[in-house]
Image: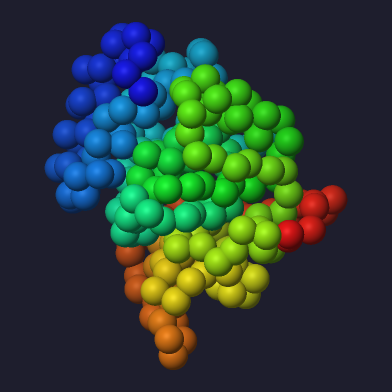
Amino acid sequence: MGAPHLDRFRAARRALVERLRSQGIDDLAVLHAFDVVPRHLFVPEALQLRAYEDAPLPIGFGQTISQPSMHARVLQGLELKPTDRVLEVGTGSGFQTALLAQLSAQVYSIERIAELARRARFVLDALGPLRVALRVGDGSVGWRRYAPFDAIVVSAAVVEVPAALREQLVVGGRLVAPVGTGTEQRLMRLRRTPTGEVVEDLGPARFLPLVPRATSEEAG
């Protein structure tokens, strides 16, 4: 990802990385991913000059790209290893998808809005060979064909983590999701163990709610 299109925003990216570091993000792999993935390519052209602000931005269809610090907290909470296979529920702009691809062996991403999935695929393909499988569907049912996963990230708020997703996590795997409604949300990490699950609170969160896709494909 060292293409010339990064140069114009290099200083802004470095400043963002330092801001994340000052906010407690200390996973070096996560910081490196933010340094090399061009967030400005994943936002509307009219908003590109704001791409490296620590703020959510609209991407159309009533959706937003989360603020970088929230993405960073999610990624650090996943505790990813280079060999991990990751399921992403909610592709959105594709920015988090690209970050995940930097941090893992393979990403499987599901988006319910076909046009957002198309746009994300276009940008991801333009960045070069990334190990990303993307489909349109209902992310709440997961992707059984490729399960189980080492890590699962849910990019929209749920009242309760869907059982289908918990079942598709390997023993030792981590699932990070915003849990709650409206402004009363917490970023939660669920870790699957041989005897059950361990749940940890990673702090406050603010996400749009997870909406099932009524005409989605089957989970497989």
Count up the numbered dots: 0
Q: Position of residue 18 (x, y in %)?
A: 17, 34
Q: Quadrant of the C terminus?
A: bottom right
The residue lying at 45 percent from left, 61 percent from top is 151
In this rendering, position of residue 170 left or right of residue 218: left
Q: Residue at x 39, y 48 (%)?
A: 104
From the viewer's perspective, is residue 22 above or below residue 124? below
x 60%, y 30%: residue: 121
Q: Nearer the viewer, residue 131 or 88?
A: 131
Residue in front for this viewpoint, 48 or 79: 79
Classify residue 32 by image quadrant: top left
Q: Is residue 219 above or below residue 113?
A: below
Quadrant housing residue 203: bottom left
Which residue is the extreme one toward the right?
Answer: 215
State the image coordinates of residue 62 (x, y, percent, origin top left): 65, 36
- Up/down of 151 relative to 29, above or below: below
What is the x, y in percent for residue 142?
64, 60
Please state the horizontal and vertical placement of residue 57, each as a whole percent of the image.
48, 31
Instruction: State whether residue 18 appears in this view.
Output: yes
Left or right of 31, for residue 78: right
* Residue name at image x 48 percent, y 54 percent: 86
